[in-house]
Image (tube, rainbow, N blue to C red):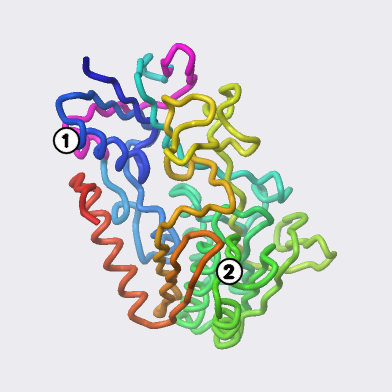
Amino acid sequence: MRKEVLVLGGNFGGLNAALGVKHELEGDVDVTVVSAAERFLFNPSLIWLPFGRRSPADITFPLAPTFGMHGVEFVHAAATVIDPQARVVHTTKGVHNYDYLVIATGYRNTFDVLPGFESADGAYTITTLEDAIRPGEGWRRFLDDPGPVVIGATQGAGCFGAAYEFLFDTAYQVKKAGLRGRAPLTYVTAEPFLGQFGIGGLPGGEKLLRMFCKKEGIQTVTGVAMQELAPGKLRLADGQDLHYAYAMIVPPFTGQDVVSAVPGLADDKGFVPVRDTYQSLAYPEVYPVGVAAAVQVPWTTAILAVCVMDAGANGVMILADRMLPPRKFGVMIPRPQSHLAKLMFEKYFVWKSRHGYVRLP
């Protein structure tokens, strides 16, 4: 009897899970993807959107044709209720039964840790497509009336790497615009040291990033929480005030409400605890993937970590034997070629995903 696999979400985790299952079990499975977004988004390139180095069209593509080419049904709708007891999901366009459910709903921003964020003029974030469009408008105004720039990551931030990339890209853009003397940059982070990244850091990482910051004239404030954001001023927990004409802050992430609403499914952050098989601890027929899965630390799965961090016209290659500690080795290698490598990977991955070639590396 053919099984019904329902996938919630169509971005990185959802697209790869849906097409991977369809290819591996062709003839034995029907796969349906329900996604509130109708376009795939290459999130790593959001750092370039505010500076006009990318447009939304450059880093997105419609999901329906991709799934259609591979015999996967696509429904552009939002999931409203997950009922794991009955094995059904209610959506804005009907009810779907399943034998197996893949939750690939990703994250959403939460600004609870920083009061005033959502109302502070001149302060932005870049972690979703909609969020990354607004700082582009602000950046164009900033170029006409420059001043201090604050880039940072709050306590519990969801992606410290994006803050660093945006920091060095901003330094590059400031220099390119001839505003270095009129737009001093400050980086503020809850990390205990530069390059900790929320994952324990890498050997030599702090020294390397301090060198980068010194070269670009960037002041750094580490190991401090953010207390409040007001128009033109960021108040830190130690009482220090940082004034800004333009600011970009990376907030914490939380899971989607539809996942959090299921009793026993998600943790207090809205992400789903999983077994080594990525099955939900509470419901074995439910498989959270990507950001939707709650990763337990220490995570000892031997997955090689390869990351490219952009830095304007430069870049850093990050290599480690494991994504999270404990590790046997880890290294950060600065080189201009890393910037080109990131550009090439973007083109390759978007092409691969658009055509549904999920078996390619």
Three-letter residue code for mark 1: His
Looking at the picture, tell me which residue is in the foreground, 67 or 98: 98
Would you say 274 lies left or right of 57 here?
right
- Residue at mark 2: 201
Looking at the picture, tell me which residue is in the foreground, 308 or 78: 308
Please identify the quadrant where the N terminus is shown: top left
Q: Give how far across and how far down residue 29 sits, in percent.
A: 22, 24
The magenta segment:
63-89
Please identify the quadrant where the C terminus is shown: bottom left
Q: Give how far across and how far down residue 64 sits, in percent.
A: 23, 34
- Quarter of image, res 277: top left
Three-letter residue code for mark 2: Gly
Looking at the picture, tell me which residue is in the foreground, 60 or 338: 338
Is 256 a magenta residue?
no
Residue 87 in sight in this render: yes
Q: Is residue 235 above or below residue 295?
A: below
Residue placed at 35% from the left, 48% from the top? 41
Residue 148 in sight in this render: no
- Residue at mark 1: 70
